[in-house]
Image (spheres, rainbow, N blue to C red):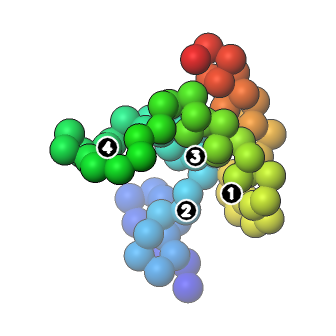
Amino acid sequence: MAEQIDGAERIHGSTHWGTHDEIEYVRKIGENFPKNHIGTKFTKKQLVQKYLTAMQKKVNWGNINKKEVLYYATELLNTL
């Protein structure tokens, strides 16, 4: 059941993830590895490429505008 909290509609205790949130996720991808991270570490460019590949498989985009995110991620990749 949806409820209004601080002007944002919430379902099951969390706000809806929207286009802005997804773009922020892509913008920050790869920036949150712990300093002592062990294992394969991909470059930001590799992670954006993987994101673009994975997004082709995603079916339910909910409140996210897939075209906007695709455009942003592609432009970001071109700058890396």
What numbered label is drawn on residue 22?
A: 3
Mark with earlier residue (1, 3): 3
Q: Is residue 78 visible?
A: yes
Q: Give the amino acid type for the residue marked by disc 3 in the picture.
A: Glu
Task: Please tell me how crowded label 3 is: few (under 14), some (14-19), or many (20+) other residues with Cα within 10 Å.
Answer: some
Nearer the observer: mark 4 or 1; the answer is 4
Q: Residue furthest top?
A: 79
Query: Image point 74% across, 46% down: which residue?
Result: 53
Task: Please tell me how crowded label 4 is: few (under 14), some (14-19), or many (20+) other residues with Cα within 10 Å.
Answer: few
Contact between marks 2 and 1 (CB within 8 A): the answer is yes
Quadrant of image for the N terminus: bottom right
Query: Image point 58% across, 34% down: which residue?
Result: 46
What numbered label is drawn on residue 33?
A: 4
**Which residue is labeled 2 in the image?**
16
Query: Image point 71% across, 62% down: which residue?
Result: 62
The percent coordinates of residue 3 (x first, y second) are 49, 75
Q: Residue furthest bottom?
A: 1
